[in-house]
Image (spheres, rainbow, N blue to C red):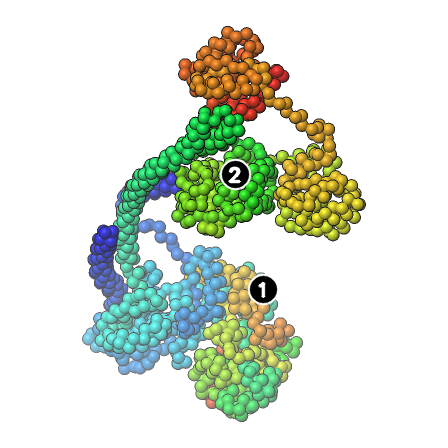
Amino acid sequence: MTPIKSVSRKWSALFLAVLAALSLTACQGSAKPKNLISQEKEAARVVNLFSPMEKTDPNAKNIARTASDLTVAMAEEKLGVSMMYRTYTAENYQDKTYDEVTLDRARSNMDDLYLLNPDTLLILGAEGKLMDLSGLDSAKNLREIIRVANTVDGKLIAIPQEIVAYGLFLNMDLFNQYGLSQPETPEEFLECCRVFKENGFETPIGANRWWLETFVFAQAYADLYNGGNAEAEIAALNSGEAKYSDYMRPGFEFLQILIDRGYIDAETALVSEAIEAEGPDFLAGKTPIVMAYWGAANSETGYGKTDFEMQVVGFPSSRGQMPVIPMTGYGIGAEAEHREDAAKALDIMTSDEALQLYSETNRVISPSKNVKVDCVPSLRPLNDRIEEGIYVLGSNAGMNVEQWGNTCLIVRELLEGASVDECMAAFDALQEAALAKE
Amino acid sequence: MMNIPNKQIKRRGLSLLLSIILVFCMFGAIIFSVSRKTAREMSNSAIQNLSESLDLIQSTIEAILRSEAEFQTLIAQEIARVDDPEAYIRAYEKNQTMSKMSLILSGKTEGISNTGERFTEDSLDFSAGETVMGLPISQSYLNYMGTWSYTMKCPVERDGREIGTLYAEYIYDAVDRSLPEGFYNKQASLYVMDAESQRFVLKPKGMGQRSAGHLNLTDFYRANDIQDPEIRAEVNACLGSGKNILFYHDIRDVQALNYMWSVNGGTIFLVGYVPIQAIQQEGRTVSQNIFIVVASMLAAFFLCILLYYLSWRQQDKLRKEQEAERKLHSQQLAEALQAAQIASESKTTFLSNMSHDIRTPMNAVLGFTSLLSKDAENPAKVREYTQKIMASGQHLLSLINDILDVSKIESGKVVLNLEEFSLNDVISSVDAIIQPMAKARKQDFHLEATGIRHERLIGDETRINQILINLLSNAVKYTPEGGHIRFRIMELKQRSSQYEHIRMEVEDDGYGMTPEYLETIFDAFTRAENSTTNKVQGTGLGMAITKSIVELMGGTIEVFSEVDRGSLFRVDLELRIQEGHADRRFWEQRGISRVLAVDADPESRESIQSLMQDAGIRLDTAAGWEEAAAWLRDNGEDCQIVLLDWETCGLQAARDLRESFSMPILFLAESGAEGMEEALQIKFTGILTKPFFVSAFREKVAQFWADPSEAAAPVPEEDGGLQGLHFLAAEDNEINAEILTELLEIEGASCEIVENGRLAVERFQEAEAGAFDAILMDVQMPVMNGHEAARAIRSLDREDAGRIPIIAMTANAFAEDEKAALDAGMTAHVAKPLNMEHLKSVITQCTKRKEDGS
């Protein structure tokens, strides 16, 4: 017998022996408990998170959401809690808005953690419905501007995961085609619109019912925030010595011109949701200018992937291109059912580690002074201005009239046909109401 | 004949294959049918399972709605009893189920809520006309808490008169708390949809962006890609009629059961999907287990087939081997039989030939003996007749030697005597024997050696000589006068560093052989028969002996021949190299460190260099005399010897060289080269016969350097006269004894004959010391043979028993016979028939040794 045969026979015998042993083992029974129901049920720790939901293709990855999810997963893992998403999306403009529902739910203590837009944030803060977050570890890392803008009555009421900066998204291929440079001032902007209009672009600006107010803020507060006398000017506004309407008027008049000259389609804008309406035309090169937030330049569901060269710049103002920064952030219901766990979760979600992950994923400006991330090339003009410290705030907790939400609503009135004077009167009324409240 | 069984086997194999395929088809059909039935049953089971779950949820929600309606009716009754219903409402606090309670008194359009606000019915939509236990229920809406809710209204009746309407708002979150946590282990989705608005008013817990499609039915369709118009139409029909619908649709590539389940007669619907695998977890396990069982059975089946096949293949292999063995045996038997027959025939032929060949010289011997007796008085005639008798006897002897050689080789008794030898000696002796034979027949015999790198080898020199002489003498014999004979010896590529691979070729342009004869040339007892060769004497055994010896040495012999064109015999041998033979001291003692070899043939130069590489000498070469002269101008003083190729350089070169230098000159020349005599006139010159060999070179060098011990002329051997010597001879054959006595007497010696070994021992014992000079001992004798006698003599207790020469004289003429004789204590061995010169020489040497006392 050859050695190979001998070895193969040995292996065959071993294989059969193992097979037999396994067969015998398989026949062995196991002891069964009498009670068949498992008693090991842990009381689940839950944090209810109320945040807006976008109507997107379920298979498409929304970068912003994914980044947020990553930090949520981090909190879940570290705390052992489950973050329960609760969402609301308006079907159409006649439905309650997300902000309205947020106010209702926060006032009724329906959830624990809320992702709040600037206006709701300030309203709820003023109503004392939000918990003071200044004790969180992550609050210590915040940039000063963020801390100030989110502080109401000495309480830090929200912490953002990113600084949301709004800007103008320009199709540079078209700008170059018509020999136009990036507009710095309102006049230059109007000139650009004129050229586009004359060259067959019916409405050079793609607008929606939410973000036209950014034009107003840029012109209204360019001097206030960049003139070196912000505190005094805000104090004058809060005391009634100065009027908000005086600040707002140039911006509204500017919008009125845009509407009157047909650079904006007011009727369409009034019923359009952000990006959904104007996005396809911008991507198709039919609209050379839109406005959007920083993250849209990174997101495939926004303007992250264009066939043309895109640049994001600030809004035109007397001080040149002006980024507009409203404050969004996470707030916790002051009387929320799981507020302790919610606070711990938020502390993790806004920790430097989580914000680093978030900023790297979305390539956004971090609210933490310890986190620095490079931005995509198209955002550099906007980023450069912010790094220079030139911007206006879209919301400010230090002002007694809420800015972001109110201005949005009043711009809608303008779109509906109200005059600039009527709009200014609305601001005056708001200011009077605020003064009366005090 | 062989095709029929093959066809049968093929047909049988085909049938077996078809049967197996059939079995597999049946097996597959059964599995398919069973699995289809199982799948159908599992599908039914899944539908039933989901239906039951949804029924349960439906019942739960309906129970909640009923309990809410009953509760509201009770409150309405309570309000009817109180004096101030509006105060009752204001005092009522919201709870987990009911978020708001409002009352509008009859006749009014506006009422109050427990939240303190004014209340109208305007914001509520009861147009669908749905009820719960008779109470109208509104369309779902987002309430002041930002959550989905519905309102039921209940009349407040006092004494049969309606005094107002009670509105109670309920939030879906209350329903949510009663729903199963993690529907189908959180793999399923479960929405509650308001039928009228088709909006989802309750979503799965934890729902977020990650699973979109929870806005309304359209969103659900979009997100889950439910585009089939038939399904949509059917869903719409069911939504309209308040019926349930369940349908299969893949959700993100996963097979799922989608459902729209009517609750409260179609007011709201349970909407969602459940992946089949979530419902059929156990079914999946069952399927997996069935698959494992089927796979195991198939594996076992294939294993059995494999084992059967292996066993069959082994048996088949065994059977084939046995058949092959049987066939081989039969063939061997047939061949052996044929060989035996051929051998028998050959031997008959041989006997016939031998009879002829032996009778021919025997006839001469007897004839001339008769003539001798008649012409005894005529000395001239006597001398002539005895010479012819002698020649015939010699021929007879060689014939007998060959016959004995063949029979010994065939019986495997030949033993090779492996000893160190020099190729130079072999070539010299072959040249010495063949050259005269060729010259006698006026043939041109040319000898060449190429590429030989090792001269000293180990082998049986005698047998190698025998091979070469056989081949060359045949070449001389079978080549007509004036023909050419070439003997080439060359080295082939070594297969082992320890063995020299040598090729020896003998080529002639003689008669050649027919292809038929070539086939039998190496068989014993055959001889080329034709009118020409019949003139040639021979036993026909030479080639058989040659081949046998070559094969005994592990070599090969080939022959190529064409009639009238000549023949080429090629012998390849591998001979062990004698290592470390280089005698560096020889050259050192003579102060030889540098030699120049001049030869136009690069192969020759290379051969010389290769042969001399171990001698410790720096050997330089030149391709011609001009080059050599230039070299000598620079290095002449350091050069001790110059080898000049005669053909390349000629006489003038030697003269030129001698004018400038005095070192010895050796001419490398063919044997018998012309003009050498004149060259040898030059001082310090000599001839080295080509091919070059170190041993020959050494001999010449030794002569030049005239070492007294080496140069001493050999002492001429004394004349081997046996005058006065007295021998004791044991010989049982009277004639042989007489011949011996006569021959010795002719030489002047005397001899005493005894008939066997015993008598020889006794006679020696009796004799005085020195009575005999030597004992001549036959080996085969009656009573006591020669070996025993020699041992007995050597063992005698006598002073001369050990040294008296005992010379074996026997017809057993082989090397092993000689060895046996020497082993028995004899001094020397002489083969019969006696050659008197040889005997004299041996006796002289033996007696001389005895005198020397060695």
Is any atom of residue B833 visible in this view? yes
Q: Is residue B296 left or right of residue B449?
A: left
Checking the image for residue B469, the label placed there is: 2
Query: A312 and A210: which one is in front?
Result: A312
Report in which chain the residue with disc 2 lies. Answer: B
Residue ID at (46%, 70%): A62
Residue ID at (65%, 78%): A227
Q: Name the kind of residue labelled 2 in the image.
A: Ile
Residue B564 vertical placement versus B718 (above, below)? below
Q: Is residue A17 left or right of residue A242?
A: left
Q: State the CA–CA distance, disc 1 to disc 2.
A: 105 Å
Residue B285 vertical placement versus B485 (above, below)? below
Query: A173 and A276: which one is in front?
Result: A173
Q: Is residue B214 left or right of residue B618?
A: left
**SS for tag 1?**
loop
Q: Name the kind of residue labelled 1 in the image.
A: Val
Report in which chain the residue with disc 1 lies. Answer: A
**SS for tag 2?**
helix
Q: What quarter of the picture does the N terminus of chain A occupy? A: top left
Residue ID at (31%, 60%): B278
For residue A6, what is the image quadrant?
A: top left
Q: Position of residue B174 (x, y in %)?
A: 32, 65
Q: Residue furthest right?
A: B660
Q: Position of residue B209 (x, y in %)?
A: 42, 68
Local packing at callout 2 (Cα closer than 10 Å; few below 14, some 14-19, many 20+) is some
Q: Which residue is mark 1?
A: A371
Q: Position of residue B357 (x, y in %)?
A: 41, 35
For residue B773, what is the image quadrant?
A: top right
